[in-house]
Structures are given as C-alpha cells and as structure tokens.
Image (cartoon, coloured by chain):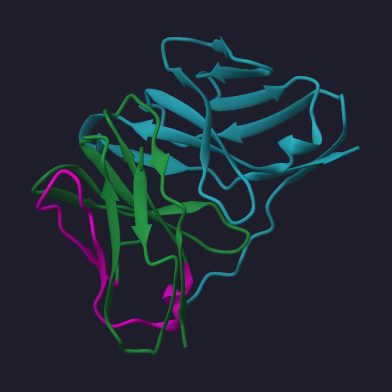
Amino acid sequence: NAGVTQTPKFQVLKTGQSMTLQCAQDMNHEYMSWYRQDPGMGLRLIHYSVGAGITDQGEVPNGYNVSRSTTEDFPLRLLSAAPSQTSVYFCASRKTQGSEAFFGQGTRLTVV
Amino acid sequence: GESVGLHLPTLSVQEGDNSIINCAYSNSASDYFIWYKQESGKGPQFIIDIRSNMDKRQGQRVTVLLNKTVKHLSLQIAATQPGDSAVYFCAENLSGTSYGKLTFGQGTILTVHP
C-alpha cells in the first residue's frame, strides 16, 4: 500500500533551472495539495486541487505551476528556480474535505 | 524578499507528565480541524481530528478540545513518552468558497525528558 509517493527525495538545482516535483497517490483521493516547509516554520500551502482538471492557488503560489490531468498525479513545476525556493516540499492527498490528509515523505530541494 | 525564520514555540515536559499544546486558528468558518505530529526528516502524521459541531474528542492517550468562541484548539497528551517528542501542528479546513484548502498553524516543538 504505497499511499502518497514523492520523487525525487533530494534535488539540487542551479538558479534559473526548471524541474518538476512528482506526486502520486493510489488511494483514489480527490483532494491533493502541495506545501513547502522552511526551517522554524509550519507548512505553507502552495497550490491545491479538488479533483482532476481543477486547481487553485494557496498562500505562496508565485514561482510554481501545477496541473491535475489525472486523479492519481499532481506534479509541481518550478519554471525558473530561485534560491528562495530552497525548502522541503510535501505533497498531501485526502478523500474529502472533511477527512485527514496523508503526506508523502517530502522532497528536499536546494537552489544554488 | 525572503521572510525571516520564526522560532517555533517549545514545550518541555518530563516523561509521564501530561502535555497540553495550544493552537489559535484563523477562520471562524473552518469546519474541520486536525492535529499532526512531525518527526525529524519525515512527513506529518495524523494524530486526531475534530469537527466544528463537537467541542471534545478523545483518542488513545490524546484529547482534542475545540473552543469556537475564541477560535482555539488544544491537544492534550496523557502520560507523555520520549517517543512523543516531535513538532505538533494544528490544521484547519476552510469551508465555503475555499473548500478543499487545508492550512496549518506554525507548530510547537515538544521535548520529553526521560
């Protein structure tokens, strides 16, 4: 039972590079979200989705794009990485808005 | 520019004591609340949840209290153990036009001394 799977676990990028953080869940959950977590801070919502084809912005969406073409996958794209995007990124999914969120193990991203 | 990192609130207790972790939430329209535990290097793990039509819910060694009047949530851990040492976050589900949005509080570091 895989749950929420994030890849890669670690990544180093140069400023200006682009990349996609992958997130997949096998629980048939409608709701998926991306968070970033910086040292000494809580989780801040980047983007979220309430179903395939539907996405919306969270608290800190600038510099990130998302799409939701399938129920299972919710990739997060950094089009031009900046040092301010150095963080740990967590993907989460949940069945309904009244249920708990399950988290992946995180992607530690460093932008130099 | 980059925001300055904040210092998380901390709580230090002795093994066997009861712990109380507090959280103030932001939106009076929030209808569902969750407590998470996060250990170093891991993703958050679910502890207990509560809906807005309740004011108390109990689990195994944990109790969540909800005071909607002052928008306050607390997590009580009975007979705290060293394995309970972690960062604890509360989360609120925003209803209405922001449905589907689950936002997190700042977090509290719990340290349990043997």
Residue B44's spot in the image, x, y percent?
A: 52, 43
Q: Is residue A59 visible?
A: no
Residue shown at 66%/32% (left/top)? Answer: B22
- Does residue A67 appear to the left or right of A62 in the view shown? left
Chain assigned green = A
Image quadrant assignment for residue B38: top right
Image quadrant assignment for residue A29: top left
Residue shown at 36%/57% (left/top)? Answer: A6
Secondary structure mostly taken by the magenta-highlighted segment of the chain:
loop
Q: Nearer the viewer, residue B63 or B6?
A: B63
Residue B84's spot in the image, x, y percent?
A: 72, 35
Q: Report the number of discs.
A: 0
Residue A90's spot in the image, x, y percent?
A: 42, 55
Residue A83 sits above or below residue B91 on the image: below
Residue B97 sits above or below residue A38 on the image: above
Q: Is residue B113 visible?
A: yes
Residue A26 sits above or below residue A23 on the image: above
The residues colored magenta run: A63-87
Q: Is residue A53 magenta?
A: no
Residue B28's spot in the image, x, y percent?
A: 41, 27
Residue A71 sits above or below residue B76 on the image: below
Q: Which part of the image, by quadrant, shows the C terminus of chain B?
A: top right
- Does residue A29 appear to the left or right of B24 in the view shown? left
- Does residue A95 appear to the left or right of B85 in the view shown? left
Q: Colour of chain B?
A: cyan
- Does residue B72 appear to the left or right of B85 in the view shown? left
Q: Is residue A79 magenta?
A: yes
Which residue occupies the extreme front position in the image? Answer: A1
